[in-house]
Amino acid sequence: MSVPAVTKEVEDFVGLCVPLTGFAAFDLYATGMAERYLETARQQVGAAAFAEFRAAWTGAAAQRGPRDLSPTHLEVARAITYLWLTGAWPRLAPAAHAALRRQMANEEFVVTPEAYVEGLVWRTFHGHPAGAKPPGFGTWAVPPPPQPSTVALRQDLGLDEESVCRTGLTAEVALDAVPVHLLPGYRASRAIPPSAVPTAALRSDAPEEHA
Amino acid sequence: MTDTVNTVGADEAVRRRYDVVIVGGGWSGSLIAKELGDLGWNVLILEAGNGGTETWPGYLDSLATFHSAVAKVPNSAYRRSVAAPFPDVLDLAPVPNPEPGEPEFTANGYFVQNGRLPYGTDYLRELGGAAMHWLGAVPRMHPEDFATERYGYGRSWPIDAAELQPWYARAEFEIGVAGNADDQRAIEVVTDPDYVYPMHQIPASYIDRYCEGLNGTHIPDDVTGDTYELHVRSLPQARNSTPNPDYSPVPYRPESAVGLPNYGERCVGNASCVPICPVQAKSHPLRQQARFAKTVSLATRCVATRVRLAGPTRGGRVSGVEFRTYTDPASPVGRSYVVEADLVVLAAHAVENARLLLFSGLANGSDQVGRNLMDHPTILNWALADEARGPVGPFRGPGHTSGWEAFRFGEGRSKRAPFRIEIGNWGWGWATGAPMSNVATSLGIGGDESGEVRRDGVFGPELRRLLGSTIGRQLQLQIAVEQSANPGNRVTIDRRYRDAMGNLRPVITYDLDQHTRDGLFAARKVAQKIFGHLGATDHTDHAPRNGVPPLGHFVHTLDGETLDLAYSGAGHGAGTHIMGSSAATSVVDGYQRTWEHPNLYAVGCGSMPSIGTSNPTITMLALALRSAEQIHRDLLLDRRPADLHGTAGGTTDTEVPA
């Protein structure tokens, strides 16, 4: 079934972004940003390289997921996911930036003011973008609802249980023992864009989560 | 709101003489202008920055500027200006692998910095001033805070907390404060047993309630050797809430947005107070400006360059202000003007006031102009709440709605600087750039230390679940530490450093003394213990990463324990023209009037000899209202025939009987 009012190309792009973002096509369309993000990604990656990425991800998504992607394609998949979640194109790993032979500066930028407002990350924790979509007086006093499980999210998206949506890690992250390299560390300065914030450091006195 | 503000161009502005010229259209200048205008005085405000946000489309433009900013810092809703430049937290950069003993930062903006440590505070030269990006936190100062010399440090005030109480109450009415007076009485900063704030307190956040579980817990402070009992107290805020019907003499009517009537009369939880409240439920000076009497004129894009001294027979009196205009903020080409007035008020920010006084060569017989620069060095502490207890709901509501106050007071402050613990409502945003940085690190984007694509990361449902948990459990304690007056921390000028208009840029020399560093150390240790009691996992880490020390980094050893610590600027620039009881040791008197120039006032946080652990705006505004009344008396006195000769004799007759 085709989606009215968008091109086949945008429809395919949205379909490919569902397993990346964890959000249903309905939610992705509802941002109103699908076409803009497709153009942004194509422009940032380069038309030819983007076509190669699409082919690679189309194949990988049907098979074993992102772990089958080349490092450069993996970084592109991450950038597109970052775009949907934050409304900004991130700073890429320098190796991927070089491999793509990009002409533009490897800098983070917000695509449009509306893109920031439509970022999906806020919805992962029942929030709203800071400075937009206010929930109303006193709502901050109410306990947030519990998080849906990964299983429920998979079912909602129609993803089968076999599809693996992680790279490097052998098992799903235990939420009461999150590895610190998946968490952001202190920003040495406020000028460091979010995509360039270092991961939290492993320390000898590394915090142990209370299980 | 009405649109009565009388905006004039420079040509029109200088065509007449004024009773009062005020330099700066921020909080203090606007409040003083409104008071004097209501009393019938002819007032001109010279604002260096751009206007525009007083219209609704202009305000929305600022909002869009914020939305599209990558670094959503306090100034991110406002465009940079070459003509009237201002410091930004983005001006500072860390130095990788610094030489031992050398500064670990560079400053590449408006400020020239040559101190050991960075002065991390910004402000804004824009109509409304830094109040356009403030948080709206308005805790009064504690009686102890006015007299720290008793505890062996700092500078004491020539006036006390009791004197300021009625002025605090007036300021809270003028700007519209929501608060719980009982909470403030419990810590003795409000002393009137019948006082209520104009509006009921902003509701406490779920995070505050989560922390209330520790009420009654005793936390030892190893530095003072004392134990402090935790009690979550609400924060008074200049933010529209529900009017309190008990407020006297009549219930308060919340003020709506400037340029859009009946809008923004209550906070709706945009969670972006800094840098901009989209609905203007957060109070700002454009509201006061919209209520100006017809006798008040306002001129934007007028950069004051110097205050003029009247003739040598005029007893040190000043005659007016020189300023330059510009039409294009990006390429300033302007004309020079002089405007004359009976009385001049500098209300341009602590650093700008000092810069103007130094360049004008005025008021500096004590050699204290520019000295005693202060801020609230703020140490960030962050942790993940217990997964088993579920999410805490960060990034909702005002930036912080409650705090732990016990560490602000008591004899312990003689051993280390006191501090106020803000319970943050915006997760790890300040410390780590969350939630966006969580997306980046969960995906594994950006490359490893050698620039290669990282191996580990998650996508799809696992990404959503991981973010939901690791963002949803974020706790952050921002701890603001008192910094006391130190003459070595200072603003100077140097003819080598000029801005595009030819004005001299501020040269900042800044450091933290042992007392303040001990306070930061104690604050970090206390936060560790609090996180432990909450069952939260402390992720705070201020150590250099890959050889890069974070801004404000220093290593501190106390009682055999060594910690990597770091502080951020709080935006609370203060202390550059401090008040005192003697012309020999201070710049202004208790009314913020310069000792040497009976018709020159320097107002704002620059007048404060100490700032305690309270966000300084409400104290600044209490002082401004008190000064406005004194200015009124000064002007009346000038017009009495009997005094025509009296004021020419010098500074001896400037103390006016109240």
Image (cartoon, coloured by chain):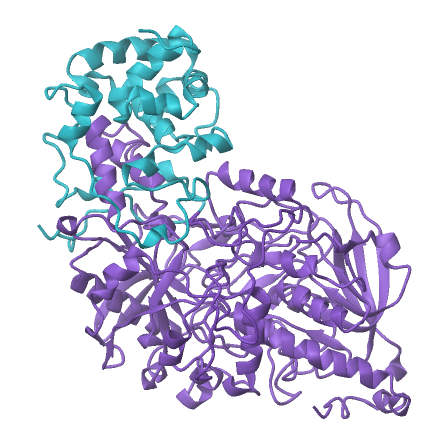
Looking at the picture, how far across and down is residue B257, in whole percent? 59, 51
Q: Quadrant of residue B19?
A: bottom right
Please identify which colour was used for chain B in the image. Answer: purple
**Image height check: is B158 above or below B105?**
below
Left or right of residue B30: residue B225: left
Looking at the picture, how far across and down is residue B454, in whole percent? 25, 30
Q: Nearer the viewer, residue B400 or B244?
A: B244
Task: Identify the residue at image location x=58%, y=75%.
Answer: B170
Q: Quadrant of residue B220?
A: bottom left
Looking at the picture, how far across and down is residue B96, in whole percent? 38, 48
Q: Quadrant of the C terminus of chain B?
A: bottom right
Left or right of residue B354: residue A40: left
The answer to whether any part of residue B459 appears in the image is no
Left or right of residue A94: residue B285: right
Q: Nearer the viewer, residue B19 or A171?
A: B19
Please identify which colour was used for chain A in the image. Answer: cyan
Left or right of residue B416: residue B139: right
Q: Quadrant of residue B323?
A: bottom right
The answer to whether any part of residue B81 appears in the image is yes
**Image height check: is B92 above or below B421?**
above
Task: Identify the residue at image location x=46%, y=20%.
Answer: A36
Looking at the picture, how far across and down is residue A177, in whole percent? 13, 45
**Image height check: is B466 above or below B489?**
above
Q: Nearer the viewer, residue B266 or B368?
A: B266
